[in-house]
Amino acid sequence: MKKLYLPIIFFTVLCLSSCVDIEERYNFKSDGSCVVAYGFDMSKAVSVLVNLVSDSVKETPQFSLVKDTTLNFYSAMPDSTRQKMSAAEIELATSSDLTVHMNLKKSIMKVAINHTAKNAADLKYYLQNVSKIALNSQISAFSNNNPKTNKALDAKQMVVGQDYYSYEITPHKFYRIIDKTKFNAFLKKTQSTFMMAKAMLIDMPYKVILNFAKPIKKLNNPKAVLSADRRSVTLVTNMDEVIKNPSVMNLKIDF
């Protein structure tokens, strides 16, 4: 029972806590490449967990588990998944990683999905396909330790790399527009989760940061903040605001 007890509590805290920071970061390089990272910092939620569990649970091997590792997406996938992938999907997976930094006793729980896109076309393909690749990799990576732990990432996976954006990406522009029809379909599938979040006053903060190698010429999102040197854009919102006004996530940046 103890082996099941901790993951259940862990999952409950992560679902009911508003202390989950989500960050989407792009670093555009002068050679046209771009480093993309989706980060989830659940450390504040874990600090709540530490105060809720009993001393006996804190002494279990599961609670003492420490992870600081990076897993390649492709190597983490089962053979059955690899066999169904196209050459482009294999290239995407082999150039993407899942980083996990976890130490429950120190209230640390961070997960990051990282990828380096070679050029604008590669970046566009990645953003349109990362959701499927990330989902397969997370399940494989965590199932070897405890299948229940996968559920702790489900809420975060819902907002990463979904296919409800349309992209126009060139060496001089980054445009993404949310497709409201697809977004509404996504909300319909995840309605129960978001209803629970709203009932518990969960805001699920969401930050998007884009850093450029040269000054930005034009930015169309009034909520996004342009840095003084015009080389960085920061958009801070939360999922409740996005649900009410999906257009808040639209970005049109010329650089």
Image (cartoon, rainbow, N blue to C red):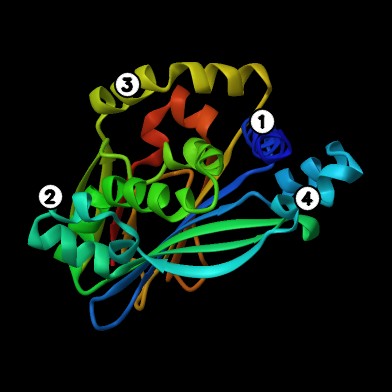
Q: Residue furthest front?
A: 1
Cα separation between marks 2 and 3 = 29 Å
Which sits earlier in the primary sequence, circle 1 or circle 4? Answer: 1
The residue beneath circle 1 is 12
Q: Can you identify the residue that label 3 sits on?
A: 184
Per the image, the residue denoted by label 4 is 60
Residue 82: give x, y in percent of width and height.
Answer: 19, 56
Look at label 1 and name its amino acid: Thr
> Identity of the amino acid at label 4?
Thr
Quick one: label 2, few (<14), some, or many (20+) residues within 10 Å?
Answer: few
**Residue at which label 2 appears:** 84
Label 1 or label 2, whichever lies nearer to me, is 2
Q: Residue visible at 54% across and 46% down?
A: 146
For the residue marked with disc 3, what is the amino acid?
Asn
Q: Earlier in the sequence, mark 3 or mark 4?
A: 4
- Residue density around tag 3, few if under 14, some if 14–19, many if 20 or more, within 10 Å: some
Query: Foreground: 223 or 25?
Result: 25
Q: Decide which of tag 4 and tag 2 comes sooner along the chain.
A: 4
Work out which quarter of the rendered image holds the C terminus and state it.
bottom left
